[in-house]
Image (cartoon, grey):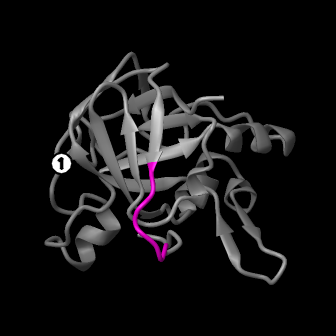
């Protein structure tokens, strides 16, 4: 199975969920055109309060649709865009990618993965109990965050459902994704 884009979403302003769209446009160094998290500097309100001059390491939010399958088995009906992601993928374990992984999407877009999305209280406000459902533990007790990955746009371009997605790993040693 080739990894691909299942859905794309965006929304102006700072609301939790995003609207599914027929396509999105990524802009180099800025993110998803027309989205509330678009910009070279941090756009997430909690991070702006701490330091508005931080670089925006969360220009694009990606979630693997396999998470939705897992959540459905636990009683949660989640659709693309519901958890605030811009790109919903199929056929790739995004959480296993190391920092610096380059995702080539569509004809020319390239996204560099910067870290994990840290689930916040807004997830439970969306669906009660969902925060616990997107968290897990390894056998040795380490926390696993499953609410998606974040990245910066290296090369802009249009992305739409059905686009192929290819992975370029960074040079070793690989560092696991951590919350950004």
**What is the quadrant of the C terminus in the image?**
bottom left
Instruction: Please indicate whether residue 63 sits to the left or right of residue 71 in the image.
Output: left
Q: Residue at x 53, y 64 (%)?
A: 120
Front-most of 11 and 126? 11
The quadrant holding residue 48 is bottom left
**Type of secondary structure dominating the magenta stretch:** loop
Residue 153 locus on image (x, y percent) = 26, 48
Label 1 belongs to which residue?
A: 30
Residue 160 locus on image (x, y percent) = 39, 21
Residue 157 locus on image (x, y percent) = 23, 30
Residue 169 falls inside the magenta stretch: yes
Quick one: which residue is furthest to the front in this view? 171
Q: Which residues are magenta?
A: 168-174
Quick one: which residue is furthest to the bottom in this view? 140
Q: Residue at x 33, y 57 (%)?
A: 58
Q: Residues within 10 Å of mark 1 (few under 14, many from 20)?
A: many
**What is the quadrant of the N terminus in the image?**
top right
* Secondary element at tag 1: loop
Where 8 falls versus 61 (above or below)? above
Residue 89 locus on image (x, y percent) = 55, 35
Residue 68 falls inside the magenta stretch: no
Instruction: Please indicate whether residue 25 sits to the left or right of residue 1 in the image.
Output: left
Where 73 falls versus 49 (above or below)? above
Quick one: which residue is furthest to the top in this view? 22
Front-most of 160 and 176? 176
Where 133 falls versus 69 (above or below)? below
Instruction: Please indicate whether residue 137 sits to the left or right of residue 41 in the image.
Output: right
Instruction: Please indicate whether residue 22 sits to the left or right of residue 153 in the image.
Output: right
Q: Residue at x 62, y 49 (%)?
A: 93
């Amino acid at each position: 199975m080739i990894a691909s884009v299942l859905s794309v979403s965006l929304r102006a302003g700072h609301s939790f969920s995003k609207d599914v769209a027929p396509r999105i446009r990524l802009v180099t160094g800025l993110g998803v055109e027309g989205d509330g998290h678009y910009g070279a500097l941090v756009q997430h309100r909690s991070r702006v309060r701490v330091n508005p001059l931080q670089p925006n390491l969360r220009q694009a939010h990606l979630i693997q649709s396999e998470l939705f399958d897992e959540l459905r088995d636990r009683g949660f009906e989640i659709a693309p865009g519901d958890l605030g992601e811009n790109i919903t993928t199929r056929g790739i374990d995004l959480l296993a990618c190391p920092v610096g992984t380059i995702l080539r999407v569509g004809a020319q877009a390239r996204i560099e993965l910067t870290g994990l999305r840290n689930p916040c209280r807004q997830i439970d406000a969306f669906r009660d109990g969902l925060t616990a459902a997107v968290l897990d533990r390894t056998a040795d007790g380490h926390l696993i965050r499953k609410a998606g990955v974040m990245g910066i746009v290296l090369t802009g371009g249009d992305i739409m459902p059905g686009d192929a997605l290819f992975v370029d790993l960074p040079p070793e040693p690989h560092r696991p994704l951590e919350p950004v």
